[in-house]
Image (cartoon, grey):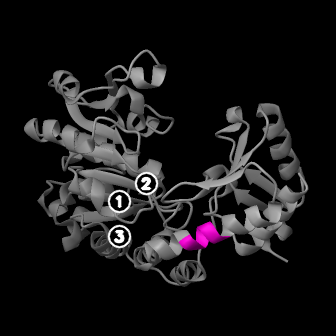
């Protein structure tokens, strides 16, 4: 019996990847054990976040870092940090920004369903450029000079959605940002693996980077990382913490030293609803150490072997594996209707198998191995064999 049996919730096979709507992936035993141990005692949360900062600093090369309740929370907190800095009055005012310095520039082709996190914190998004390469009439996207031309006295920062398709390059945008002393917040929620990306965006000029903790890192699904400049990380942390404390009893650790410069403590910050528990912090730190110590080739070989086993059992035509960092199995069918019929059949079985539908218009359903076990691969292969 499992907890899900007790609750009357059927378990599924998640072949979509670590998507939140399907509960993400599965944690390694040592990650779950770290969370269990963390639940058995109480600690000062600032001290625990300081320990997490040391772990994140080692993994990313950032000046500091904190564990958040997901990548979206990291983006919200990063935005709040840029808008308020270390000014407790500005923190108290969010999401209002009395002086109007609240605009975040972003490339129009990088608009996404998650950028509302910036707006919640108090930002106003200013879209730049025309994405002809997506709409079809041409090949161009925004250019660095267009972002520079959009800068006004109300510009607070630049938001950049990282991805293989993202243009202009982060390095080019960072050149503009540095000239105008504007911080860059990078949303890299799904940009792991490769492990090198933990360093890459900071090396290319980002001031803050948000990662998901519950995807490839293998941490708790409700965890994330915000890494970057110590002053901004300190501000982000303060706007998430429980601050029901006398000011003369407050003593921030060295990992968040800029907080010692503040003239006073704000009230509970706009990120209070983004609080993260001791269990998630312990689990994320354990998962991050495990992720960075695992050989990249070994991790990919494990995923690839599962997909190859599925293809071997399924047989037939229309099966192919592609993808570098994360290999993906494509199951090609004649058309959209056939692809959807197959997806529905897999989802209607016991256990339900949920496949990726991002390429269904091409008649393709996909299998992502990150949230699969060897037993799952066997089951998917057998079920596809009967398609």
| Left or right of 308 in this view: 153 | left
Q: Which residue lies at the image location 72% right of the left edge and 45% below the top edge?
A: 365
Is residue 294 toward the left or the right of residue 196 in the image? right
Which residue has dot 2 on it?
A: 191
Q: Is residue 188 magenta?
A: no
Closer to the N terminus: mark 3 or mark 2?
3
| Start-end of magenta stretch | 301-305
User: Which sits in the foreground, 157 or 345?
Assistant: 345
In which image quadrant can residue 381 be found?
bottom right
Element under disc 1: helix
Residue 256 in sight: yes
**Mark 3 residue element:** helix
Lower sequence index among marks 3 and 1: 3
Label 1 or label 2, whichever comes before in sequence order: 2
- As drawn, the label of residue 49 is 3
- Say if mark 1 contacts mark 2, CB within 8 Å: yes
For the residues bearing labels 3 and 2, Cβ distance under 8 angstroms? no
């Amino acid at each position: 019996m499992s907890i899900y049996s007790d609750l009357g919730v059927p378990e599924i096979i998640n072949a979509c990847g670590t998507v939140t709507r399907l509960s993400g992936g599965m944690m390694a035993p040592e990650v779950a054990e770290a969370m269990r141990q963390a639940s058995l005692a109480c600690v000062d949360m600032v001290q625990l976040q300081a320990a997490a900062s040391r772990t994140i600093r080692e993994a990313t090369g950032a000046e500091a870092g904190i564990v958040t309740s997901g990548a979206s929370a990291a983006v919200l907190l990063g935005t709040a940090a840029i808008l308020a800095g270390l000014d407790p009055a500005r923190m108290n005012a969010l999401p209002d920004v009395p002086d109007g310095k609240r605009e975040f520039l972003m490339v129009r082709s990088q608009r996404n369903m998650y950028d509302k996190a910036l707006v919640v914190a108090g930002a106003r998004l200013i879209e730049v450029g025309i994405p002809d390469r997506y709409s079809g009439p041409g090949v161009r996207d925004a250019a660095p000079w267009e972002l520079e031309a959009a800068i006004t006295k109300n510009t607070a920062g630049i938001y950049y959605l990282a991805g293989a398709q993202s243009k202009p390059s982060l390095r080019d945008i960072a050149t503009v940002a540095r000239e105008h002393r504007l911080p860059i917040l990078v949303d890299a929620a799904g940009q792991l693996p490769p492990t090198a990306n933990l360093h890459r965006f900071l090396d290319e000029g980002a001031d803050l980077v948000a990662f998901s903790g519950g995807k490839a890192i293998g941490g708790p699904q409700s965890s994330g990382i915000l890494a970057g400049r110590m002053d901004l990380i300190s501000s982000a942390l303060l706007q998430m913490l429980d601050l029901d404390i006398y000011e003369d009893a407050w003593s921030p650790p060295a990992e968040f030293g800029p907080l010692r410069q503040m003239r006073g403590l704000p009230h509970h910050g706009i990120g209070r609803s983004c609080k993260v528990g001791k269990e998630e912090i312990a689990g994320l730190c354990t998962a991050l150490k495990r992720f960075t110590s695992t050989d990249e080739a070994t991790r990919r070989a494990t995923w690839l072997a599962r997909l190859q086993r599925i293809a071997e059992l399924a047989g037939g035509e229309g099966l192919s594996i592609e993808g570098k960092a994360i290999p993906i199995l494509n199951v090609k069918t004649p058309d959209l209707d056939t692809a959807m019929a197959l997806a529905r059949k897999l989802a209607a079985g016991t256990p339900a198998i949920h496949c990726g539908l991002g390429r269904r218009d091409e008649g393709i359903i996909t299998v992502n191995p990150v949230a699969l076990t060897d037993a799952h691969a066997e089951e998917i292969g057998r079920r596809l064999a009967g398609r």
